[in-house]
Amino acid sequence: RDGVEPGVAANVAVSGVAVMCATTVTNPLDVIKVRMQTSARRRAGALVGTALDVGRREGLGTFWRGISPALTRAALYGGCRLGLYDPMLRVVAPAVEGEREGAPRVATRLLAGAASGAFAAAALNPTELLKTRMQTEAGASTTLMGHLRAVVREGGVGGLWRGSGLAMTRSAVLTATQVATYGEVKRRVVDLGLVDADGAKWRLHFAVAMLTGVVTTATTNPVDMLKTRLYVANAAASGGANAPTVRGTLVDVLARYGPFGLFRGFSANYMRLGPQTVVTFVVAEYLRERFGMSAL
């Protein structure tokens, strides 16, 4: 790890810009993923079929629904989720590994990533909930403020944190697997001499990030599926005895679609997470190098 050890603000700022770039590119795929996961059909439509259906029925503008909360979430949640990882690792590594020299172990990276991811998701759950509701809505779209008022009216301010437990779980798993996989694979690829770390760095970052996207999609899709269904569950029940629960949502998904129902939207999820991971890490690595910060 060459370069200086940046402060928390610098880490969060660089990560926020990187995630915003990735979100701008992948928002249409996020919309398709949400539509596949919330489809009432027993068999979710294919990626291309869902995209064509949405575009034909609702217009191309539909693919950019939820972009306002998505970019807000990218700057804040994405910035904190990845930006707090490095400072968290510098705190966790000495506590877990003592005075051990060399790169932190994979388990230590997983722990630091899980902590930063869970914290960011807990703090910024409202932006994810509003984004998901906007992307799910068919027909005439409700404004961001309209969704915000509806959620607060139906479930109080606490309704903005519906599904936060699942969001924290997903974010912890996502961040842990993402940063740990990226860092470990990158290190091994360089150590084996497969790619020259001082040569075309973007090629190294691109290849490692694509592989990282596969791992993160596989580990997070079941939690993401449940989170999406919970976010868009009957809002009228959000504050009463019939309020949707994680267990109830899981039982419903398994009853309707079977075990593979937890992987609905996998293709769209990877098509989003793959490019998003690539853009995020390539931009982040570029900015960190430009500002004299250590590599991820």
Image: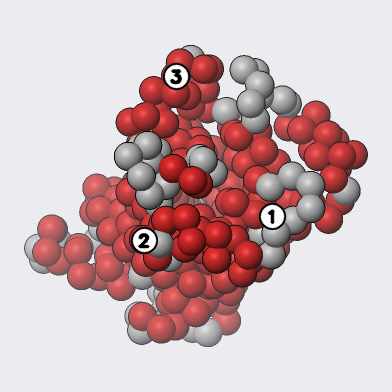
Residue mark closest to the camera, 3 vs 1: 3
Mark sitting earlier along the chain (3/1): 1
Residue mark closest to the camera, 2 vs 1: 2
Residue displayed at 70% across by 59% down:
142
Picture disc at residue 55: none
Residue 118 location in percent, x, y? Answer: 33, 57
The residue type indicated by label 3 comes to Leu
Between residues 137 and 178, which one lies in front from this camera angle? Answer: 137
The residue type indicated by label 2 comes to Gly
Vertical placement of residue 177 versus 123, above or below: above
Count neighbours of disc 2 (C-alpha within 10 A) and say few if under 14, some if 14 to 19, many if 20 or more.
few
Residue mark closest to the camera, 2 vs 3: 2
Residue displayed at 55% across by 65% down:
148
Q: Quadrant of residue 49?
A: top right
Mark sitting earlier along the chain (2/1): 1
Between residues 36 and 296, which one lies in front from this camera angle? Answer: 36
Query: Which residue was labeled with disc 3?
Result: 254
Are the residues tagged 2 and 3 within 8 Å (C-beta)? no
Query: Which residue was labeled with disc 1?
Result: 27
Name the secondary structure under disc 2: helix
The residue type indicated by label 1 comes to Asn
Name the secondary structure under disc 1: helix
Residue displayed at 46% across by 16% down:
255
Residue 234 location in percent, x, y? Answer: 51, 40
Q: Is residue 5 visible?
A: yes
Between residues 111 and 99, which one lies in front from this camera angle? Answer: 111
Q: CA distance from mark 2 to mark 3?
A: 28 Å
Query: Which residue was labeled with disc 2?
Result: 158
